[in-house]
Image (tube, rainbow, N blue to C red):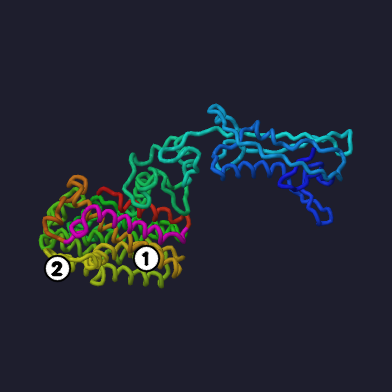
């Protein structure tokens, strides 16, 4: 007895190993090569679901409609109409058994195998349905049973949960917006490398090596040429070598390495930017300006020596910076590159940069500035020298191209402003012992700050936005720029 589906005649196909195929009338007796038995089972299952019955037929019921064995004559055209069986109502215990594949599957139809009896021409066929049961899993909270999850990513969480975190990673999740939304320690970035062992650990090691390198290079610069100048040189040494994070030398070294240069090539640039920074702090602490008594946890220069000596020490550090930048013992750059480096540093430290920003700062005390005016002031006061640190390091490598310098400049502008925003935040949140200077000094002087203008929470968000801009600018660079990426994160995560 041959199965018939919707009036279509089925007969064994001698060309297809005795599998059922559909014979199409009026088409010269050709056979459509479809495996109708399997297709029809799945079709009927889906059709019943569309009629409103959401329960699939059980496996025994599916076997009951399996096409019986056809007669041995391949040319037989007898049509047998099999009435559709009524849809069974499965008992509760039957829900645990395997079902055919359907919109809400519980098992998967693996294959349909036909056993051929070799004693006859085509042989009686025996249909064997093979199923693989899919276990029923409980739904997650907020998701109906059997529904597909809307988003992927749980596999990563399960794999991450099997491994203990690196003990060198920070203890808790840092603040973040785009990155902070990920699980702690799950941050990743383009050009990943083994150098990444947590922001704090990487920066600590890199800061230690860079600080040792730049301190050794500056050590010979404070040797007094005569006994009469010993006190002046001692004040200069005190202003530079009494601690500090050395962020600007770190940026110079990291920019040089990002372009394939050796760190030693940036010694002159690292010394120059640190000397300019130290001179600006000495003058900034004077009674005529901010009148601070504490710097880096030590008495300021005008307190340790006197006001006149502090002014002269600052002047000496400024000129010494350009001498170090041109010292052949600290840099082997060509004359053309050295000229570009001197021009870059002079513009960043002069009235078009740091000095101009300091003048705007002194004139803004007690005034209410909008965000655009505040950014203009800080891009000159703080950001100009940070930008020069990155550019000088890139030039010292001898491999800086125009596009690379443009990308590094965008990076430096973002972190330069982020550095000042974080400074304003720490002036509110931190304490004097941690900062190494008087906490709340800007508030006491009624200076315009980002927390005062935007609010503390909005200022933190703005710092993270600037960090993201800096990281975005480094996308064209490979893993050699990893220290620059970590420094961008460190600048907005530091606590002093």
Image mark for residue 210: none
Nearer to the camera, 132 or 437: 132
Q: CA distance from mark 1 to mark 2?
A: 28 Å
* Residue 121 in picture, x, y percent from top left: 89, 38
The range drawn in magenta is: 448-477
Q: Count the marks.
A: 2
- 131 vs 143, left or right, is right
Q: Secondary structure at mark 1?
A: helix
Residue 99 in view (yes/no): no
Q: Quadrant of residue 79?
A: top right
Q: Is residue 13 magenta?
A: no
Kindly identify which residue carries mark 1.
Answer: 409
Q: Quadrant of residue 447?
A: bottom left
* Residue 302 in picture, x, y percent from top left: 13, 57
Image quarter hosting the N terminus: top right
Task: Please report whichever mark, 1 or 2, sits nearer to the chain's N-terminal start.
Answer: 2
Nearer to the camera, 394 or 320: 394
Kindly identify which residue carries mark 2.
Answer: 363
Q: Quadrant of residue 351?
A: bottom left
Q: What is the crowding at mark 1: few (fewer than 14 residues within 10 Å), some, or many (at least 20)?
A: some
Residue 386 in view (yes/no): yes
- 355 vs 16, left or right, is left
Q: Secondary structure at mark 2?
A: helix
């Amino acid at each position: 007895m041959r199965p018939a589906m919707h009036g279509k005649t089925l007969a064994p196909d001698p060309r297809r190993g005795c599998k059922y195929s559909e014979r199409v009338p009026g088409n010269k007796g050709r056979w459509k090569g479809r495996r109708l038995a399997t297709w029809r089972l799945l079709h009927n299952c889906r059709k019943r679901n569309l009629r409103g019955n959401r329960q699939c037929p059980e496996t025994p019921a599916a076997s009951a409609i399996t096409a019986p064995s056809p007669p041995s004559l391949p040319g037989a055209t007898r049509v047998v109409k099999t009435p559709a069986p009524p849809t069974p109502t499965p008992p509760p215990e039957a829900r645990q058994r395997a079902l055919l594949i359907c919109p809400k599957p519980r098992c998967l139809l693996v294959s349909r195998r036909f056993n051929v009896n070799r004693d006859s021409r085509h042989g009686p066929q025996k249909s064997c349905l093979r199923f693989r049961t899919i276990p029923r899993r409980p739904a997650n909270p907020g998701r109906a049973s059997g529904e597909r999850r809307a988003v992927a990513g749980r596999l990563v969480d399960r794999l991450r949960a099997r491994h203990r975190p690196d003990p060198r990673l920070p203890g808790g999740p840092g603040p973040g917006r785009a990155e902070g939304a990920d699980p702690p320690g799950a941050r990743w970035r383009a050009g990943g490398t083994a150098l990444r062992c947590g922001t704090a650990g990487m920066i600590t090691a890199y800061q230690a090596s860079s600080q040792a390198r730049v301190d050794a290079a500056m050590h010979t610069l404070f040797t007094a040429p005569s006994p009469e100048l010993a006190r002046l040189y001692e004040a200069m040494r005190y202003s530079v070598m009494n601690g500090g994070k050395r962020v600007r030398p770190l940026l110079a070294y990291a920019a040089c390495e990002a372009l394939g240069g050796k760190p030693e090539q940036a010694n002159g640039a690292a010394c120059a930017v640190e000397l300019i920074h130290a001179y600006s702090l000495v003058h900034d602490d004077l009674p005529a300006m901010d009148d601070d008594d504490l710097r880096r946890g030590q008495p300021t220069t005008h307190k340790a020596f006197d006001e006149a000596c502090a002014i002269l020490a600052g002047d000496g550090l400024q000129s010494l910076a350009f001498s170090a930048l041109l010292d052949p013992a600290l840099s082997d750059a060509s004359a053309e590159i050295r000229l570009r480096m001197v021009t870059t540093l002079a513009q960043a430290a002069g009235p078009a940069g740091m000095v101009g920003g300091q003048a705007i700062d002194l004139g803004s005390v007690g005034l209410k500035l909008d965000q655009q005016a505040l950014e203009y002031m800080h891009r000159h006061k703080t950001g100009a020298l940070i930008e020069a640190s990155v550019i000088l390091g890139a030039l010292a490598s001898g491999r800086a191209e125009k596009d690379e310098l443009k990308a590094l400049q965008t990076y430096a502008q973002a972190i330069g402003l982020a550095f000042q925003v974080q400074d304003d935040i720490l002036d509110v949140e931190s304490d004097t012992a941690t900062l190494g200077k008087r906490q709340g000094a800007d508030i006491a002087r009624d200076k315009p700050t980002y927390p005062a203008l935007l609010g503390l929470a909005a200022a933190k968000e703005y710092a993270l936005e600037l960090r993201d801009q800096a990281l975005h600018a480094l996308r064209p660079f490979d893993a050699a720029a990893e220290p620059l990426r970590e420094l961008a994160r460190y600048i907005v995560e530091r606590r002093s």
